Amino acid sequence: MSRPTKPVRLQPVQSDTSPQRPPTAQRPVRSRGRALAMNAHITPHRHAWSQFTYCASGLMQVTVTEGERETTYIVPPSRAVWIAPQVSHNVVVLESAELRTVDIVAGALPDSWKECRVLVVSALLRELIHGLQGSTPGAREDALMALTLDEIRSADTQALGVPMPHPTLGDKRLRTLCEAVLRAPGERGQLREWVAAVGASERTMARLFREELGTSYQQWRQQAVLAHALPQLARGMPIAHVAAAAGYATDSAFSAMFKQAMGRPPSYFLAKRTG
């Protein structure tokens, strides 16, 4: 039996710590951009403010740690991750990306926003983020900030998160397996096809999924499949190709799973619907 793909070598990149970055009461929304190469890794960090993380092009993986729970999101340009204040997070660039971070002063968004979430990025919000980058204080910036906050508040959410074992408290065998599946969820469909490489029995790994992640392997893998499939659809990849990459023998089987999980068929999420 072949082993899961080995992890790629990541290139650590520090987060932006410049003193001009933090949002303030006078300038509650700040937008910054940077170009990052594939496999760049912005190491774990946290902020006193909330952050809207988005890439204008490319593909990224954002992992957040909330208490003892870690969640990974696969994020295309049509989606963004909102990260609550003081939540540890890191970013891995899966395809060379133009990263945009929108920093938002604490308290500017509804009190009910306690947990991180994936938001759908509208065409207007994309332009607002671009317009805010490099803006200067004044009436125009005030209008851009107000409209940006309104668009973020009203943005639709989407279930793109994949729960992961805690990096230090979780079982290392489970984390190794989850990382391998997340990199290539279509490579193998069954748990028994993955377990040999991590040195544990299928029964042991099934128990660890239930105990640490509160789900079965198949339910967890489905989330990993969806996390990869949605960005591919957002980039216009044909459904047949997405289904094959997810390990499904037929388009219909993939579409049935997708519609049951997302409430809509994969065709709804093709590139034409993301603008």
Image: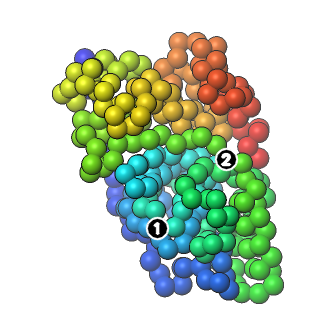
- Say the numbered circle drawn on residue 40: none
Q: Position of residue 16 (x, y in %)?
A: 46, 73
Residue for point 66% across, 39% down = 234
Pointer 2 local density, CA inside 10 Å: few below 14, some 14–19, many at least 20: some
Contact check, label 1 and label 2, Cβ < 8 Å: no
Q: Can residue 9 be seen in this view?
A: no
- Upstream in sequence: badge 1 or badge 2: 1
Q: Nearer the viewer, residue 237 or 53?
A: 53
Q: Nearer the viewer, residue 33 or 213?
A: 213
Q: Position of residue 15 (x, y in %)?
A: 43, 69
Query: Could you say whether the residue bearing mark 1 is in a helix, strand or loop?
Result: loop
| Badge 1 amino acid | Gln
Question: Which quarter of the figure is the N terminus placed in?
Answer: top left
Does residue 138 appear to the left or right of 69 in the view shown?
Answer: right
Residue for point 46% across, 62% down = 87
Does residue 186 appear to the left or right of 175 in the view shown?
Answer: right
Q: Mark 2 points at which residue?
A: 157
Pointer 1 local density, CA inside 10 Å: few below 14, some 14–19, many at least 20: some
- Furthest-left residue in view? 199
The answer to whether residue 41 is above or below residue 259 is below
Query: Could you say whether the residue bearing mark 2 is in a helix, strand or loop?
Result: strand
| Badge 2 amino acid | Thr
The answer to whether residue 140 is above or below residue 177 is below
Does residue 212 appear to the left or right of 82 in the view shown?
Answer: left
Give the Cα separation between the discs numbered 1 and 2: 21 Å
The answer to whether residue 70 is above or below residue 269 is below
Q: Where is residue 145 in the image (x, y as percent from the top left)?
A: 73, 74
- Say the numbered circle drawn on residue 86: 1
Residue for point 33% across, 47% down = 166
Q: Which of 150 and 57 is in front in this view?
A: 150
